[in-house]
Every structure is written in C-alpha cells, then in structure tokens.
Amino acid sequence: MKDLIFIIFLPSVTVIITMITALSMQWMLEKEVNDKQPFFTFHVVNIIFMIMMFGTSSIVFHGMVLEALQSKGWLTTFLYAYVYPLPFIILLYTLTVPLFRSYLQPYRMQKNSNIIYLKKQQNKK
C-alpha cells in the first residue's frame, strides 16, 4: 500500500497541479501572443513538463524515501517514473485540454454560423 501511494498517488497529484498550472499559462500566452489560436508547440512542452514532474516526484518519493533505488536499481525506478506513466499522462492531457479550454473561454460559438453566445457571468457576493 505504501509503495502504491509513493509510486502513483503523490506523483499523480503533482501532475494534476502541474497540468492545471501549465494549461492556464498556455491559455494566457495564446490569448496575448498568438491571437487566441492554439499553438502545438505549447502542448508538446506541457506534456514534457508533466512527465518531468511525475518522474522527479516519483523518484524522490519512491526511490529516495522508500529506498527503492538501492533495492530495485536505477533502471526499474526510471521505468516506473518516466516510461510507464507516459500513456496515461498523454491520455489525461488530451481529455483535459478541450474541457479546460471550453471552461476558460468566455463565449460559445454556434456551429455552421457566425453567431457567438457570451457565457453568463456568475455574480460573486
């Protein structure tokens, strides 16, 4: 159970926080610099950054704290940290990007039309 927490849960929390931060920064950069057009290079950089954060936190928590580096070796720890989570991180990212983009976008566009609907602002009290 302890291995599961240190290999999967804590690095996953780190990746989710990293993804939210990276997508927010990407949206702001695209809004200011790229005339609100998606820029593919940002997605590649975000995925690489998320893999780095998952791998680093996994090696620190699992490899150093639980001393898996000494018992399992660098290769096994590296595979757990960087290679095995790669498909899940890419899948999570591709599912999250459209949802995040639609949440942050202040309007909705109607298909096959030039009509744009503004989202209603929530009154904060």
Image (tube, grey):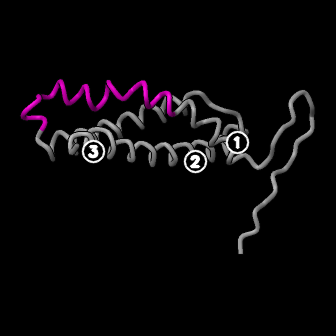
The main secondary structure of the magenta stretch is helix
**Residue at numbered disc 2:** 24
Instruction: Say what amino acid the circle numbered 3 marks.
Output: Ile
- Closer to us: 92 or 18: 92
Instruction: Say what amino acid the circle numbered 1 marks.
Output: Ser
Tell me how far mark 3 sits from mark 2, CA to CA: 27 Å
**Residue at numbered disc 3:** 5
Instruction: Kindly indicate whether the residue at mark 1 contacts the one at mark 2 (C-beta within 8 angstroms).
Output: no
Region in magenta: 68-92
Secondary structure beneath disc 2? Answer: helix
The residue at the point 21 percent across, 45 percent down is: 2
Foreground mark, 3 or 2? 3
**Residue at numbered disc 1:** 102
Of the image marks 3 and 2, the number of the one nearer the N terminus = 3
Judged left or right of residue 42, residue 76 is left
Question: Which residue in the rendered view is the most extreme toward the bottom?
Answer: 125
User: In x, y percent, where is residue 83?
Assistant: 32, 24
